[in-house]
Image: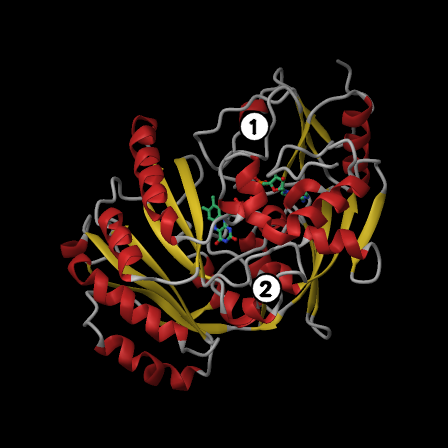
Amino acid sequence: MSYQDLSGEVITPKDTNYENARAIYNAMIDKKPAVIVKCKNDQDVVNAVNYARDHNIEVSIRSGGHNGAGLALVDDGLVIDLSGMKGITINAATKTATIQSGNTLNDVDAATHEYGLALPSGIIGTTGIGGITLGGGIGYLSRKGGLTIDNLLECKVVLASGELVTANKDENADLFWALRGGGGNFGVVISFKFKLIEIKNVYAGPMFWPIERAKEAMMFYDNLTKNASNDLYGFFAFLIVPPAEPFPEHLWNKNVCGVVWNYTGPIEKADEVFKPIREFGPPILDFVGEIPMPALNGMFDALYPPGMQWYWRAHYIKELTPKSIEVNIQHGSKIPTMHTTTHLYPVDGACHDVSNSETAWANRDARWAQVIVGVDPDPENAEKVTNWCKNYFDDLTPYAMGGAYVNFMMNEGQERIKAAYKGNYERLVEVKTKYDPTNFFHVNQNIKPN
Ligand SMILES: Cc1cc2nc3c(=O)[nH]c(=O)nc-3n(C[C@H](O)[C@H](O)[C@H](O)COP(=O)(O)OP(=O)(O)OC[C@H]3O[C@@H](n4cnc5c(N)ncnc54)[C@H](O)[C@@H]3O)c2cc1C
């Protein structure tokens, strides 16, 4: 096939950089696209959409390449790769940022932190702003500033028709509603405009307890965070302590439980806020202290470099009960490999200030998005971590709300996608039918048009 109507860097299997270009974060995925278009500007994206549509080629969209299910790539199809589009403009006066889709969260942090500002988003810096935003966006600032989409003001989008449109609360408002949680279903988002919140340094970091205290620790954490101000965030985890500095050697490779905290209130009050937390315990590790926000956001990047085997499943959780705590401990105390873990990410606080119908993200009544993640560098362990993950997920299902955060889903079928969007699914179908009636953009957690 001749690709002369495409622009940008056009990479095919004949090119020496093809293997690099098709590598994504999850090494369990091995898809072989026919062509990868590394877009440099808006016109490259328009040309790629028009070309794929006119030649009836399947298309996928790649920003950061972090998607666990590998939805950034498509076998034998055309990948619209936005990772080279890295413009960021900050307006300090209006506290807003316009961010092209190729930026990672590290890029965003570095640009906003200079102005004492931050965008609520995810916890690993190499994640792409594109995919995380369109699925919702959960992270250390969720309780303080809501989901990433709650801070979204506008998107520039290339539709399946090749038209470049703006979506905000006044222009294409139905599209703007759908983009806030509906994923890559509606078009290629070239750039996002966000409002930012004032955050410079935070009082944050991990705190661990022995696994034998997991039951009390989970109950204590549940009660404390239920009544805490939105300035206090903490995600609960079961994990294995990495056998490396700065962790003390006596804890290396121990299966423990813990919380990664983020306190965004006045620093002079931090000791007082953490007094009861430190008194429950004592923790076997306490790395909580004042750090710059980007240091927290990038804290686990080195532990999770690209190229490992990943398999994950997720639930929304409304409450922790004695029975669900038991299930968590049963699996959380038998973590099969050092990188494998489970996290309960809070989605309460400011996330609950928005109603379920205001954006496509329909889970404002959940307290946590729990992710169960099997990870290992060695492909030989892929099956072991996958099985642990599936069994944990299945056993926890009776205590979960149904549905899952789309950004934490694998290829789990249409019923799970519908369950993720709950009462918003039908409205999403209407918007999909209007903007993408042929389901041109279907390599995603797909919302099918009528
Ligand atoms: C290590 C790790 C940590 C994570 N931590 C968090 C976290 O803290 N919080 C959280 O909320 N999520 C988190 N995630 C999940 C993450 O949000 C999803 O994996 C998301 O899909 C990643 O976005 P991306 O741009 O990197 O992905 P990609 O793989 O590039 O894209 C994934 C999909 O998103 C859609 N998409 C991406 N960009 C665009 C665009 N510009 N226009 C239209 N559609 C687009 C497409 O459907 C694409 O297939 C994490 C993932 C990993 C692997």
Q: Assess mark 2: CB under 8 A from ligand 1?
A: no
Q: Is residue 158 left or right of residue 278?
A: right
Give the answer, above or below, for where 13 lies relative to 129: above
Q: Which residue is under mark 1?
A: 22
The Cα–Cα distance between marks 1 and 2, rounded to whole angstroms, is 29 Å
Please indicate, yes or no, whether residue 25 appears anywhere in the rendered image. Answer: yes
Q: Assess mark 1: CB under 8 A from ligand 1?
A: no
Give the answer, above or below, for where 426 lies relative to 275: above
x%, y% of residue 237? 32, 56
Ligand 1: which quarter? Answer: top right
Give the answer, above or below, for where 61 lies relative to 4: below
Q: Residue at x 25, y 66 (%)?
A: 217
- Quadrant position of residue 325: bottom left
Please tell me which residue lies in front, 441 or 3. 441
Amino acid beneath label 2:
Leu
Amino acid beneath label 1:
Arg
Q: Are marks 1 and 2 in contact (CB under 8 Å)?
A: no
x%, y% of residue 198? 58, 75
Of helix, strand and loop, which one carries label 1? loop
Q: Residue at x 19, y 72 (%)?
A: 281
Q: Is residue 115 left or right of residue 5?
A: left
x%, y% of residue 213? 18, 63
- Quadrant position of residue 83: top right
Please tell me which residue lies in front, 368 or 292. 368
Give the mark count.
Answer: 2
Please tell me which residue lies in front, 101 or 165. 165
x%, y% of residue 448? 68, 36
Give the answer, above or below, for where 67 lies relative to 144: above
Please tell me which residue lies in front, 215 or 324. 324
Q: Which residue is under mark 2?
A: 119
